[in-house]
Image: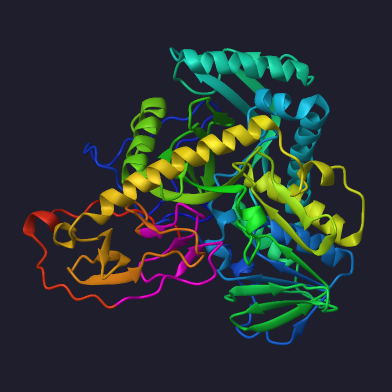
Amino acid sequence: MLDSMPDGDDGRGDVTDSGPVAESPRSTHHEVTVRRLVHEPPQDAADCVRGIPRVNGLEGDVIVIGAGVTGLTAALALKRASRRVIVLDARPLKESESCRTTAHLSEVPDTRLSVLLKCFGLDDTRLLIEGQRLAIAHIEQLSSESGMDCGFERLPGFLYAEAGDRAQRQALEAEAEAADALGYSDIRTTEIPASFAIAGALRFDNQAQFRPGSYVAALESQIYGHGSVVVRGVRVHAIESDAARPRCRVSTSGGDVIAERVIVATDVPIGDRSAIRAKLAAYRSYAIAARVRRPLGALLWDLATPYHHARTARIGNREFLITGGGDHRVGEEIDTRQILTELDEFARTHFGPLEVTHHWSGQIIETADGLPYVGPEAADDGRVLFATGLSGNGITNGTLAGLLLADLVRGHANPWARLLAPDRSRSLASVGRNMGRNLAAAKRRLTGRIKELVTDVEHLPASAGMLIRRQGERLAIYRSATGALRALSAACPSGRGHVRWNGAEKSWDCPSCGSRFDLAGAVLNGPAVRGLMPRPFVDATPVPAHAAGPSPAPVAQAVP
């Protein structure tokens, strides 16, 4: 996430071999200093982004929708196999979800090892771990081949249990037993490279970290030429792949694109693919960065629910501690600013007084059983392939998915095709877990919706949003810092629900499908391909003095 130096950094710092030491904040005031995230690809990488606004009539062998790690990994593998690849993406490189990751590269899947063993058995769990190792090795190789400094670094990872937390201690024991069954040896430890107390930990050597923005730019720079291109700023509206047509047609905001095969590598599949989307759940995950004097030299993650993770990253001549966590279902939390506050407190409690310089968030897509869906929606229809549900291991799962997709296009056997197939049967345990999760989320959405709809716009403070009912229609209302009101239809264009206000990111989020929209109604995250519709709204109510109040500290938007 942090690929360039934040504004005003002088680059001076004291870096040693031991654990991180927090820099003294410039002020003793407890309120967090928050800046908009500075994230730009290196200049030589930015020069390679040669997207064109019009694509009508463009033809190739394969169309890849989504220019993140998954799509670009697949595209590069196919280009090297002499396929003409057209990569389409609606957003600039710096706004890719792949550039919002905290960049933990770990062979340990996001779903706990003990859970994977129960659901998939010993052989398939080993295969999943081998897939993560393959992905990390592939990233290392491409980072080296690109000639760009992607900051790739091998280092150990520690899964730990907090001292005094019985639930985490029990969970750690279950993970240790699962690791033993999977063939890990001598990984139990009572020490980690940090000063806070733990009940114990598991050490996994040869994990990695890198700078995701530089890596994505490096991938993209290698796509161009020999009939292949990356086109950004073009939004896909529909995919036509019926049997009556010899080739697939992708309709976009810049015209129609034609190819024999289509790879959909967006977070959530776009178009009329309800069978896959019905098995997905969208989550927001948050991260902060703070200056420290010493690197951790390791990846850390705990067993809390939701769990926290931490690493350090060297940006220019300055070391930053990056801490993540606070996951919640999209649209589920009303006061998302509280999540950032809690994450700040976690970082200070565990790593000392910190000057938090950045806040940001990203989208995580979960499946019912914790494994990605990669391949055709149905075994008898292989012209359109999908990759989604990459979970918290988005970079490694995305890399593995990209390699698998390239093999499927070329007709090559791949050991992970069966395990990750979208039409795979699910275990009863995963079905029960998903059903309980969806019922709980539905109850919270209904309760929150009723609460919001009975609130009068008169009490809406500045720089905030709410839902109201006006003439039988639900409206999403935002009041600007100057008191002006903006009204949008609250109905998500995906047709599956109504949006909710996200105060931390100043966005409208749909709890049903995970789509997100900015203050003007434009799409931030799919699967929606069209924005919220504007609505006329006249309200002469002045902003109450008490309602406007002091503005909250600014928070980095999910999409700048």
Q: Residue at x 38, y 60 (%)?
A: 508
Q: In this view, does 139 lie to the left or right of 97?
A: right
**Whether residue 288 can be seen here:** no
**Residue 423 position in % (x across, y down):** 76, 48
Q: Which residue is drawn at 63% across and 28% down?
A: 112
**Residue 365 position in % (x across, y down):** 58, 48
Task: Say which quarter of the image contains residue 246.
Answer: bottom right
Give the number of callouts.
0
For residue 415, above or below residue 9: above
**Residue 251 position in % (x across, y down):** 66, 79
Q: Where's the C terminus, which quadrant?
A: bottom left
Q: Which residue lies furthest to the right in this view?
A: 412
Task: Say which quarter of the image contains residue 218.
Answer: bottom right
Q: Residue at x 52, y 35 (%)?
A: 436
Asked if the magenta segment contains residue 69, the reply would be: no
**Residue 222 position in % (x across, y down):** 75, 66
In the image, the segment drawn in magenta is 507-535
Viewer-closest of 145 and 391: 391
Viewer-closest of 319 and 399: 399
Q: Which residue lies furthest to the left in this view?
A: 545
Q: Which residue is drawn at 55% across and 28% down?
A: 17
The kind of secondary structure the magenta stretch mainly shows is loop
Q: In this view, does 178 lie to the left or right of 407?
A: left
Viewer-closest of 486 and 195: 486
**Whether residue 126 can be seen here:** yes
Q: Which residue lies furthest to the front in this view?
A: 472
Identify the coloring: rainbow
For residue 168, above or below residue 105: above
Q: In this view, does 131 lie to the left or right of 523?
A: right
